[in-house]
Image (spheres, grey):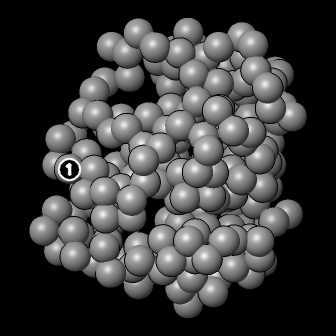
Amino acid sequence: MGVELIEKYFPKLTARQREQFAALDELYRHWNAQINVISRQDIDSLYEKHILHSLAIGKVVQFVPGTEILDVGTGGGFPGIPLAILFPLSDFHLVDSIGKKIKVVTEVAQALGLTNIRAEQQRVEQLNTTYDFVVSRAVTRLKPFMGWVRYKIHKKGNNEIPNGVLYLKGGDLAEELAEVSDKYKMFDLTEYFEEPFFDTKKIIYLPK
């Protein structure tokens, strides 16, 4: 199932957004054959396990125009590229320490005509800019991750939830969360999506 899966949960897509989401399958198959950013067994589940999973953040917050988002450890562009399609008036900075992965991100973004993405080979600890939100897909345990990004977030925001971190992760997170904060909110993705893949998947929101 391809773009139809995205439309199932995001029925208000524009024609342009539908085109961009539909183009992702061929683009990722092409680039993944050259630079492996998605496991071979996952490429056939691209829309469920990577694109829709990334878009779960769009169920928790609808980024207002001008929102600045940092995607840490973006890999092949997740969650940043699907979110940049969904929120074309927000600005996304996608960083990864591996240059080959950033090449894929850059090529995919250019092919889609996404002008709201900046991709950079960079370690997040070395960034000296700040953002409204930091997003990521399970690059490490929460405690070291929060150490990297704690001072990368503006205090003042314009979205319906305060600025902070939106972290996609699965499994039992009680121990990890106890290490970082008691001010988090956890969203079970089964609240939004019915596919079994999402049964253990969550978004952890840690406000600034």
Q: Looking at this view, is 121 or 21 the one in front?
A: 21
Q: Residue at x 44, y 34 (%)?
A: 93
Spot occupied by residue 165 in the image (x, y as percentages of width and height): 65, 30
Taking the image as drawn, is residue 47 in sight? no
Q: Is residue 174 above or below residue 179?
A: below
Q: How many marks?
A: 1
Q: Residue at x 62, y 58 (%)?
A: 86
Q: In the rendered image, which quarter contains the N terminus? A: bottom right
**Left or right relative to 180: residue 22:** left
Q: Is residue 194 above or below residue 152?
A: below
Taking the image as drawn, is residue 37 in sight? yes
- Tell me which amino acid carries mark 1: Lys
Q: Residue at x 74, y 81 (%)?
A: 8
Spot occupied by residue 108 in the image (x, y as percentages of width and height): 32, 61
Crowd around label 1: few <14 · some 14–19 · many ≥20 (10 Å): some
Q: Residue at x 37, y 15 (%)?
A: 127
Residue under numbered circle 1? 103
Q: Is residue 84 above or below residue 159?
A: below
**Left or right relative to 120: residue 163:** right
**Left or right relative to 155: residue 98:** left
**Circle 1: element type:** helix
Spot occupied by residue 182 in the image (x, y as percentages of width and height): 81, 21
User: Residue placed farthest to the bottom in the image?
Assistant: 1
